[in-house]
Image: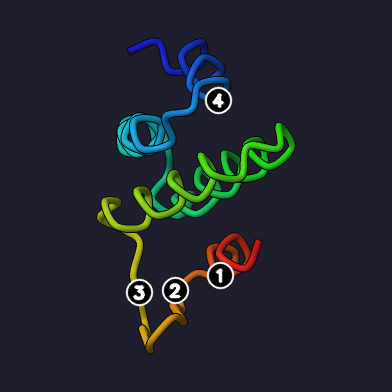
């Protein structure tokens, strides 16, 4: 439950799925409801700055599928459009 220190351990691991579940739990316990997209984008940018593209993709997919506040507006073939424009930006990255 020490989210601050465990965040850095997860970032340097290759387990984007577990990191996403931890960040969802962290947001639900300590974040404001309107910040759900910021928790996602901060982690994505940190993964990308470490050049860990595969874990970033795994994190994004797990977070967007499991977070109760993330809403998918449109899914057409390979295009997914989310309610939050910043999540759409992260999806583009």
Would residue 30 be seen by someone viewing this image from the given angle? no
Please tell me how crowded label 2 is: few (under 14), some (14-19), or many (20+) other residues with Cα within 10 Å: some
First in residue order: circle 4 vs circle 1? 4
Disc 1 to disc 3, C-alpha distance: 10 Å
Residue 67 lies, in percent from the top left, at 30, 51
Task: Name the quadrant containing residue 54.
Answer: top right
| Identity of the residue drawn at 71% across and 32% down | 50
Disc 4 to disc 1, C-alpha distance: 22 Å
Identify residue for label 3. Answer: 72
Image: 48 above or below 4: below
Disc 2 to disc 4, C-alpha distance: 24 Å
| Identity of the residue drawn at 50% across and 47% down | 40
Mark in front: 4 vs 3? 4
Please tell me how crowded label 4 is: few (under 14), some (14-19), or many (20+) other residues with Cα within 10 Å: some
Task: Name the quadrant containing residue 56.
Answer: top right
- Do residues under tags 2 and 3 come within 8 Å of each other at their CB atoms? yes
Residue 62 lies, in percent from the top left, at 34, 49
Identify residue for label 4. Answer: 11
First in residue order: circle 2 vs circle 1? 2
- Do residues under tags 2 and 1 come within 8 Å of each other at their CB atoms? yes
Disc 2 to disc 1, C-alpha distance: 6 Å
């Amino acid at each position: 439950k020490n989210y601050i220190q465990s965040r850095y351990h997860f970032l340097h691991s290759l387990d984007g799925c577990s990191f996403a579940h931890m960040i969802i739990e962290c947001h639900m316990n300590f974040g404001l409801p309107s910040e759900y997209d910021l928790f996602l984008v901060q982690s994505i940018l940190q993964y990308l700055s470490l050049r860990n593209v595969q874990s970033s993709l795994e994190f994004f997919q797990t977070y967007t599928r499991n977070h109760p506040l993330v809403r998918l507006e449109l899914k057409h073939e390979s295009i997914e459009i989310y309610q939050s424009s910043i999540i759409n930006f992260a999806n583009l990255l």
